Image (cartoon, rainbow, N blue to C red):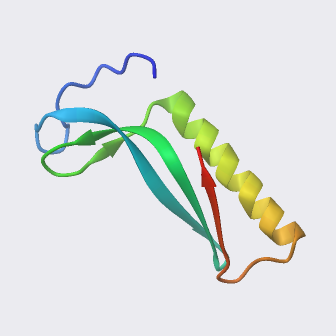
Amino acid sequence: MSQFPLNNCSNCGGEVSRKMISRDFNREGTTVTIDGIRAIVCNECGEVYFEPEAAQSWLDAANALFQLSRRNRQHKGTLVGVTG
């Protein structure tokens, strides 16, 4: 992870730390879960920050999984998961 100039949460002023998190993405009744996303999380309020290059990578992964679920007709409530 490259340097991210954030020492305190812009929401509450709390201390932030780097963590691995999971995120769910929903589109047209399909849920895609991506694990192992690198993020910066506020230890006080839970606000989550992403570095731009990392955010683009997992958005690309989510879009690829949505396309795969449509191709395989696994949609409308099917959960597709990936570990990053």
Residue name at image x 50 percent, y 45 percent: 36
Quick one: 28 or 54, which is closer to the camera?
A: 54
Residue at 17%, 30% in the rendered image: 8
Image location of residue 30, percent across then percent down: 66, 75
Where in the figure is residue 33, as x and y percent of width and height?
56, 61
- Above or below for 18 versus 12: above
Location of residue 56 (image quadrant):
top right
Q: Position of residue 70 (x, y in %)?
A: 83, 70
Q: Is residue 74 left or right of residue 31?
A: right
In the depicted view, which residue is nearer to us: 83 or 77? 83
Seen in the picture, residue 64 relative to 38 is either above or below; the reply is below
Q: Residue furthest front?
A: 83
Quarter of the rendering containing residue 81: bottom right
Question: Is 52 drawn above or below residue 4 in the view shown?
Answer: below
**In terms of image quadrants, where is residue 74?**
bottom right
Q: Quadrant of the C terminus?
A: top right
> From the viewer's perspective, is residue 69 above or below residue 28?
above
| Residue depicted at x 73% and y 58% | 65
User: Which residue is at the far right?
Assistant: 71
Q: Is residue 7 left or right of residue 49?
A: left
Residue beneath the point at 56% across and 54% down: 34
Q: Check the image and name the residue furthest to the bottom.
A: 76
